[in-house]
Image (tube, rainbow, N blue to C red):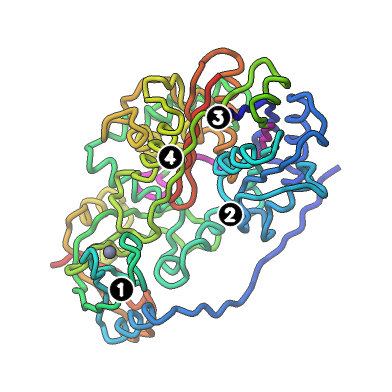
Amino acid sequence: MRIGIVGVGFTEFGIHKEPFYNIAFTAAKRALEDAGIERGEVDSFILGGYDNLGVGRTISNMYTAPAAGAYLRHEIRVSDDALFALPLACMRLRHRSDVTMLLAFGHSSETPIELVELQSLDPFFHRPLNLSLPAFFAMQSYAYRRRYGVDEEKIAEVVVKERENGSENPRAFVRDKVRVEDVLSSEIVSSPLRRLEIAEWCDGCVAFILAEETVARRLTDSPVWVSGLGWSLENYYFDREFQKLPFVAKSAEMAFKMAGKDRGDVEALEICDLTADYHCMILEALGFAEEGRGWDYNGDVNHSGGALCTNAYGSTGAFLLASIVERIRKGEIDCGLVQSMSGYAQRSCVAILEG
Amino acid sequence: MEVKEFEIWWKIPFKHSAGLHATKFFEGLKDGKILGVRCERCGRVLVPPRAFCERCHVETNDWVEVSDEGVVETLTVTYMKFTGLPDPPYAIGVVKLDGADTGMLCFLGGVDLSEWRKVHETFKPGTRVKAVWKEEREGKITDILYFEPLK
Ligand SMILES: [Zn+2]
């Protein structure tokens, strides 16, 4: 049995004045409209996004249940970047759901996310050292650049390319082009990472309607099939090689195995480049570039502008997924791969989609 | 119409149990000692200590003292002010102590932090560093003020 995406609903990705659940409602309505179905035809609701203090409510993802239309219905939540909710949506569809909604919410503009993420660290060994998310990302960037002798210019060129892509994507949050010299003269946030090399936070929601094969074919002529899924976890403590992302590699292996495909089948990638260095490191871990050479990859990657242009805390992975889905629907590509990650670079999820 | 905003602060007290392993580690810090545990399966010495080895999924009870000197694995100097975080600059690194098989998160210091390239040169990976201890120790990770380059 195949599982297809038959509807997508985007909201604007930006800084929203409305609370996240009202934004989520808009995404849900648009997805239903796009699939051409009524809310009553959805028999299962999967809610993705963080349930931490990012929006200042515990179990905050619960607020999106009514927004999805899940009143008195079967709903279940995945507290992580919303791409991690896709495996659960597919599992539901394999077990007695005909039509499932995956609603992803992302919201960052109500509090300093760095302070929220710091609370995810243990209070004994790590939190007292004030390891902010950008500081952790920077330690990986430094290890990466030093280990492989990667010039700052090469990293800056990644940002320039991502910004060019973002400038052509009307859905992207950051849409200004930059030059290499702009990147290299932007201020150091945490060395060696500069402001323009780090994804900026925003808000935004995306919803998807998924259906099992028979229903999917009835609802649309162009379902986008979820062919492969994989996810993996890094350790909590710091016994790692900082220049690598082995958990990303594991998540990709799992997805490729399930899809029965190899790298050559994938025509486009959308990856969660929370920093320009992660852009390179992810490409390497996914097996699309040699170790230390991710900056040199000139394949079709992050046509949307990637996380570097649109990073809504909790729905970034869903934004990337929706970007691939749209391109497959338009017939631009037949097969694409989406990757997302979360935490202090601790968890990765990969999905392989095809038309 | 201007959308109304409500300013809310969270202030919730917790009393976190550190557990026996972390307690023993923190008691060690009071005496100026850094303790780790050896995993009997893989033989790695884990610092800070933990009740089980996540790679082998076995309990760890073989205590060993490690050195307060080691080598830098990676580092960063933060220059941006984040709400609720200290005023910059401050340097954070991961140091693998002599006798340990895992890196430990720590502050780096004892040098001028104003120019990041100089700091990275001073503490580049492989640089030997030594702990600078607080005079009055209270059994917390911050009893180690920072690691500085070994003279
Ligand atoms: Zn072990």
Query: What is the quadrant of the N terminus of chain A in the image?
Result: top right
Amino acid, disc 3: Val
Mark 4 closeness class: few <14, some 14–19, many ≥20 residues within 10 Å: many
Q: Which quarter of the rendered image does ligand 1 occupy?
A: bottom left
- The answer to whether residue B122 is left or right of residue A245 is left
| Highlighted magenta segment, given as a residue range | A188-209
Q: Which residue is mark 1?
A: B60
- The answer to whether residue A266 is left or right of residue B121 is right
Disc nearest the viewer among 1 and 2: 1
Q: Taking B142 as reference, is A218 above or below it?
A: above
The verdict on label 4 being within 8 Å of ligand 1 is no
* Residue plotted at (31% across, 28% down): A289
Disc nearest the viewer among 2 and 3: 3
Residue found farthest to the right:
B1
Mark 1 closeness class: few <14, some 14–19, many ≥20 residues within 10 Å: many
Q: Looking at the picture, do discs 1 and 2 lie on one chain?
A: no
Cα distance, mark 4 to mark 2? 18 Å
The verdict on label 1 being within 8 Å of ligand 1 is yes
* Residue plotted at (41% across, 25% down): A261
Cα distance, mark 1 to mark 2? 38 Å
Amino acid, disc 2: Pro
Cα distance, mark 4 to mark 1? 36 Å
Q: Which residue is mark 3?
A: A226
